[in-house]
Image: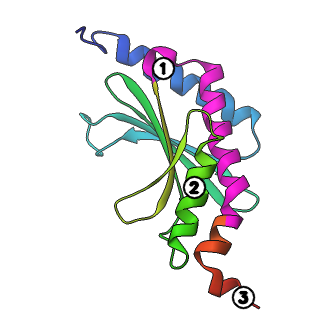
Amino acid sequence: MTDLHVGSRLDDLRAKIDHWLDVFAQSNPLVAAIDRGTSDDTPLGEPRWFVRMVGEDKDFITVWLTLGQRTLRYETYVMPAPAENQATVMEMLLRRNEHLVGAHFSIGQEDAVYLRGEIPDVALSADELDRILGTMYVAVEANFVALLRIAFASRFAT
């Protein structure tokens, strides 16, 4: 097995992501903020970026990009744990997963709904980063209201 991120490899990947996000922010009016840090807020943590975009149905969609040893992981919080109709919500998420490319709905530790994905770091490119953020944005916007109406049905009852 080879040691990835030896020497300038990690710096090259960071620079590639930083550059693309700068260009993306300048050309995209939906971008509200971009920030960079580490996964555990220490210099030794994995490099991590967040991209906050203005949504239509959901006020903001924040996508976290985390550069691991061999992969770029990405995720966004979709909604809190369903208060009602959990089985219906889970079925809807599983059915939606069938149509997603490079991402999937999942449940976090606190039972909240997330959209997550991962690619090998060798696949990193401007086109792939664009596809990732586009997929995350569109998938959340396309499903957010329907999920909320099922997961919190009594709040929407008239």
Q: Which residues are magenta?
A: 120-146
For label 2, the SS is helix
* Residue 155 spot, x, y in % from top left: 65, 86
For marks 3 and 2, give the CA distance: 22 Å
For label 1, the SS is helix
The total number of labels drawn is 3
Could you tell me which residue is drawn at 74 percent across and 62 percent down?
57
Tell me if I can see residue 22 in this picture. no
Task: Identify the residue under disc 3.
Answer: 157
- Please identify, in this view, whether the residue under mark 1 or under mark 3 is nearer the observer: 3
* Residue 66 spot, x, y in % from top left: 41, 36
The residue carrying pointer 1 sits among few (fewer than 14), some (14 to 19) or many (20 or more) residues within 10 Å by Cα, namely: few
Of residues 132 and 59, the one drawn nearer to the viewer in this rendering: 132
Residue 16 placement, left or right of 149: left
- Amino acid type of the residue that numbered disc 1 sits on in the rendered structure: Ala
Could you tell me which residue is drawn at 75 percent across and 38 percent down?
28
**Any mark on residue 93, and which?**
2
- Amino acid type of the residue that numbered disc 3 sits on in the rendered structure: Ala
Could you tell me which residue is drawn at 51 percent across and 68 percent down?
87
Q: Is residue 65 above or below residue 138?
A: above
Question: Mark 1 vs mark 3: which is more N-terminal?
Answer: 1
The residue carrying pointer 3 sits among few (fewer than 14), some (14 to 19) or many (20 or more) residues within 10 Å by Cα, namely: few
* Residue 70 spot, x, y in % from top left: 35, 21
Q: Is residue 113 above or below residue 83?
A: above
**Image quadrant containing the C terminus:** bottom right
Question: Mark 3 vs mark 2: which is more N-terminal?
Answer: 2
Could you tell me which residue is drawn at 36 percent across and 18 percent down?
10
Of residues 85 and 5, the one drawn nearer to the viewer in this rendering: 85
